[in-house]
Amino acid sequence: MPRTVQLIRSSALSRADYAYAATARSDARLIFLAGACPLDEGGRVVGGASYAAQATACVETMTQALDAAGAALGDVISTRVLVATSSRADLVEAWDVVRRAFGDHDAPSTLLGVTVLGYEGQLVEIEAVAAVLDAP
């Protein structure tokens, strides 16, 4: 059976750490995740002032949300990584964590520096869309 998500690359485009496009089978169920935040069970921001620690917590939150929807990181069709900073070094610090979490499944992604995120002290948030095939 073919994979649900197909990552698309083009030799006409510059080399990147992610696929430039992705498709999902027409019979796939799409899952739209809210932004995964670095929150503990009590709703408090974790990871302090570390972009890497907050990105790690966001990946954990996203993984749990995917699992609850019957999906995994390999089912993600695209992501958007939001980082509260104007520093490229901070963006890269967060991106490196996210990129490692996805391994060979380098889904299309957008990395954005933003001025502020929703929770006091929050530095990172990750949005994602996934696609899965439900059992018949």
Image (cartoon, grey):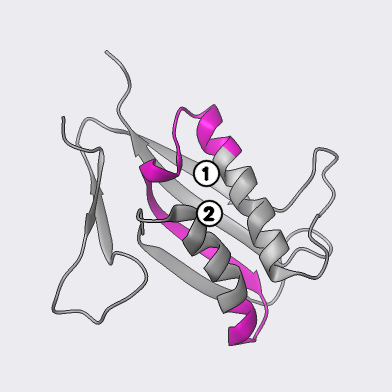
Which of pointers 2 and 1 lies earlier in the amino acid sequence?
Answer: 1
Q: Which residue is mark 1?
A: 33
Q: What x and y, as percent, mark residue 87?
A: 64, 86
The picture quadrant where one finds residue 18 is bottom left
**Looking at the image, is 28 positioned above or below residue 98?**
above
Kindly check if marks 2 and 1 are in contact, taking CB atoms under 8 A apart as contact.
yes
Identify which amino acid the numbered label 1 is placed on: Leu
Answer with left or right where residue 82 lies relative to residue 117.
left
Image point (22%, 30%), residue name:
27
Q: Residues within 10 Å of mark 1 (few under 14, many from 20)?
A: some
Inspect the magenta stretch and tell me whether residue 111 lies in it: no
Answer with left or right where residue 3 lies relative to residue 97.
left
Q: Which residue is mark 2?
A: 127
The residue most toward the top is 136
Identify which amino acid the numbered label 2 is placed on: Glu
Image point (67%, 79%), residue name:
85
Over which residues does the magenta segment extend? 64-91
**Looking at the image, is 28 positioned above or below residue 56?**
above
